[in-house]
């Protein structure tokens, strides 16, 4: 126990005095979250700007305006902004891209009797996906509700609200689990550097002449890295929650288990690298060769479902793909790429494979 | 009957086709400073590393403090202190932290302050290892070998890279340790160090021990003569020099020629005659008593520093 403490404390002190390790474990993921979170804040939670041209039916116009503005998304951002004006001006704004749609309300709408009908016109760019998927259905639902009201039924704005609140992940919801997965990878793989350095400088050889067991050296090292991983995960979840209101919807226990399993894969991978790479100078580029493609191809920043076909086989063997997928399912109930069982089996397979190769080839001297 | 603390019997170790250690036997006695000398690649380091439990022998046995090193390595490691040739320790830890790290690896340990004193780093306890000078790093590396208050300390070139003052301080540390009845095994490149410190010296070459005795007796039994050392431009060759009457041995090492003889005046006049006959220029002529360095040169044909 005394020697475990010694190894753990030594590892801790070296870690906190190493700016690079601190940066990659704590600062880097937070920078990514803030940067991408803010830059793509409107992705998936687009604010639709709708122009309302009232040509003589103020009551209908105000119903539609209120109806649209009361459509909410989960974190209480307005999804629709309205602005009124003349049809000509609003259409000009639509063409220049300042508006997403223009609703033209003709005169006489306020005074329609039962059984009578009149059309309102909706102008929009039908080539934009977001318009077809969200904007137009929302407008239809608002006008339906108003129809009912005009037809003498009780208005139910709540109904409109509910139907538009269909589960839609914001980009930040998608991103956060990916950043967590990426950080587990960084901490795991970079964490192998001290071993390579100490072996290269013959420090490990010197430790070999003391009663310290090699296994204790590994246990202390791995235990420390797991603590760093858990702290970093907590920080990522906290920043996601406080800054972007990303709710953790799944079980904490499952998340904990998945974080440990994912970390194990990458810690093993770092020992595997140390088994084949003898110097710090060659280790750094090799670590980058392992890290960077995984960071990009494993669905950290965007959905790998839309990848070109020739990249797909690569995506399918990378462990981070499965870790990101599993974390996304657990944390924000993201759409699964694979079943949870598949994710766990592939990650466990990676952990066993890397451990086996490491045991076969790793040398302490 | 003296206490034997290290017993090496019939030791063999081969790497590929290189016989690093080729059948050696020796004992180290409690309370002595035992030196190992030899050119690079002679097998010193391999021998020392087998005694430390870092490598296993192909054949033969090593018993340290009565324990077979191949059977209970950890028990031996608890009771010996080891300084390795490479002085590197954790670069991002402070002096004090490194000492405490090593202290906690042993069941028994000396106080931190004592180790700091051995390293003469009282003023630098809170400095990161990476910021120490080369000499300070070397001193700490040696001092850490004393961290478990060992019964035997094994030092691999302890004073390499130290300035003369620090070397002398390190010699004091080693002699002090010995005066407490403890045992030292050391390898060194410095002949004066070996001559000054060691009670007995083993000279190794090609994986074998070619001489083992006290420094005094090594010199006496190998070289009874005095030594004349010189350089000569247009050197006529060892044979021409050896033909001078009363020359017993000629060794040429680089530009230096060393001639051993019992009759120094006669050989010097012979040399002068040879020089004028060859119209060769004689320079840097010196006459001295034989030293350990001469023994080493005579036995291995090499200077210790290659």
Image (spheres, coloured by chain):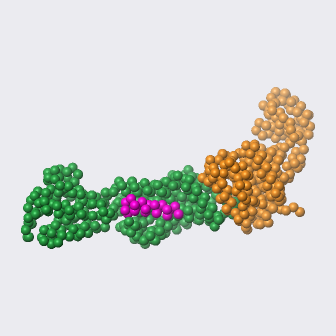
Chain colours: A green, B orange
Residue A299 x %, y %: 40, 60
Query: Is residue B164 in view?
Result: yes
| Residue pictured at 69% horizontal, 46% vertical | B135
| Residue pictured at 74% horizontal, 64% vertical | B76
Q: How many marks?
A: 0
Residue B112 x %, y %: 70, 56
| Residue pictured at 78% horizontal, 52% vertical | B174
Closest to the observer, B4 or B282: B4
Left or right, B263 with reference to B111: right
Closest to the observer, A324 or A245: A245
Image-quadrant location for residue B154:
bottom right
Left or right, B24 with reference to A84: right
Give the position of the C terminus of chain B as an image quadrant. top right
| Residue pictured at 44% horizontal, 65% vertical | A323
Give the position of the N terminus of chain B as an image quadrant. bottom right
Closest to the observer, A300 or A304: A300
Residue B221 x %, y %: 89, 48
Query: Residue B164 colored magenta?
Result: no
Image-quadrant location for residue A124:
bottom left
Image-quadrant location for residue A363:
bottom right
Query: Looking at the image, is A298 positioned above or below residue B304?
Result: below
Query: Is residue B306 in view?
Result: no
Closest to the observer, A99 or A354: A99
Query: Looking at the image, is A230 positioned above or below residue B264?
Result: below
Q: Which residues are magenta?
A: A227-246
Q: Main secondary structure of the magenta part?
A: helix
Left or right, A317 with reference to A15: left
Left or right, B95 with reference to A100: right
Residue A140 x %, y %: 19, 65
């Amino acid at each position: 126990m005394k020697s475990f403490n010694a190894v753990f404390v030594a590892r801790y002190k070296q870690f906190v005095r190493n700016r690079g390790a601190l940066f990659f474990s704590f600062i880097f993921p937070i920078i990514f979250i803030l940067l991408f979170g803010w830059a793509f804040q409107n992705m998936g939670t687009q604010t639709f700007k709708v122009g309302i041209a009232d040509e003589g039916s103020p009551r209908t116009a105000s119903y539609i305006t209120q109806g649209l503005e009361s459509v909410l998304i989960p974190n209480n951002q307005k999804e629709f902004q309205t602005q009124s004006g003349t049809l000509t001006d609003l259409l000009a704004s639509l063409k220049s891209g300042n508006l997403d749609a223009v609703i033209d309300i003709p005169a006489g709408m306020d005074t329609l009797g039962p059984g009578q009908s009149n059309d309102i016109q909706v102008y929009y760019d039908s080539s934009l996906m977001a318009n077809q998927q969200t904007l137009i259905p929302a407008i239809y639902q608002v006008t339906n509700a108003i129809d009912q009201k005009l037809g003498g039924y009780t208005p139910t704005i709540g109904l409109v609200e509910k139907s538009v609140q269909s589960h839609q992940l914001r980009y930040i919801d998608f991103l956060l689990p990916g950043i967590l997965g990426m950080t587990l990878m960084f901490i795991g793989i970079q964490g192998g550097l001290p071993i390579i350095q100490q072996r290269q400088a013959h420090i490990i050889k010197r430790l070999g002449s003391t009663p310290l067991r090699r296994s204790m050296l590994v246990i202390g090292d791995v235990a420390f890295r797991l603590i760093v991983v858990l702290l970093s995960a907590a920080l990522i979840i906290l920043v996601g929650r406080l800054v972007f209101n990303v709710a953790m919807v799944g079980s904490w226990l499952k998340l904990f288990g998945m974080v440990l399993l994912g970390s194990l894969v990458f810690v093993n991978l770092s020992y595997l690298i140390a088994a084949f790479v003898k110097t710090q100078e060659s280790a750094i580029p090799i670590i980058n060769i392992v890290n960077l493609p995984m960071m990009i191809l494993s669905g950290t920043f965007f959905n790998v479902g839309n990848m070109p076909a020739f990249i797909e086989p690569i995506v399918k063997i990378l462990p981070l793909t499965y870790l990101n997928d599993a974390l996304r399912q657990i944390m924000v109930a993201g759409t699964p790429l694979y079943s949870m069982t598949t994710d766990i089996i592939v990650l466990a397979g990676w952990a066993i494979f890397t451990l086996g190769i490491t045991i076969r080839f790793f040398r302490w001297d | 009957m003296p206490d034997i603390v290290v017993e090496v019997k019939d030791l063999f170790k081969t790497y590929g086709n290189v016989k690093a250690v080729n059948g050696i036997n020796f004992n180290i006695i409690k309370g002595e400073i035992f030196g190992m000398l030899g050119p690079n690649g002679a097998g010193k380091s391999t021998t020392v590393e087998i005694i430390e439990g870092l490598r296993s022998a192909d054949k033969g046995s090593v018993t340290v403090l009565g324990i077979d090193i191949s059977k209970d390595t950890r028990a031996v490691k608890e009771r010996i202190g080891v300084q390795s040739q490479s002085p590197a320790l954790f670069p991002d830890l402070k002096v004090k932290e490194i000492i405490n790290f090593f202290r906690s690896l042993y069941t028994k340990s000396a106080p931190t302050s004592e180790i700091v004193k051995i390293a003469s780093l009282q003023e630098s306890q809170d400095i990161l290892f990476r910021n120490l000078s080369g000499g300070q790093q070397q001193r700490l590396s040696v001092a850490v070998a004393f961290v478990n208050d060992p019964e035997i300390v094994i030092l691999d070139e302890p004073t390499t890279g130290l300035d003369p003052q620090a070397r002398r301080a390190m010699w004091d540390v080693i002699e002090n340790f010995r005066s407490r009845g403890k045992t030292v095994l050391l390898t060194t490149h410095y002949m004066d160090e070996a001559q000054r410190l060691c009670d007995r010296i083993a000279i190794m070459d090609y994986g074998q021990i070619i001489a083992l005795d006290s420094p005094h007796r090594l010199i006496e039994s190998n070289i009874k003569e005095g030594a004349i050392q010189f350089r000569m431009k247009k050197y006529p060759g060892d044979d021409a020099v050896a033909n001078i009457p009363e020359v017993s041995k000629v060794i040429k090492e680089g530009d230096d020629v060393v001639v051993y003889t019992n009759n120094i005046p006669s050989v010097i006049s012979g040399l002068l005659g040879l020089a004028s006959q060859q119209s060769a220029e004689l320079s840097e002529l010196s006459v001295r008593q034989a030293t350990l360095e001469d023994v080493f040169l005579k036995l291995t044909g090499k200077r210790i520093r290659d």
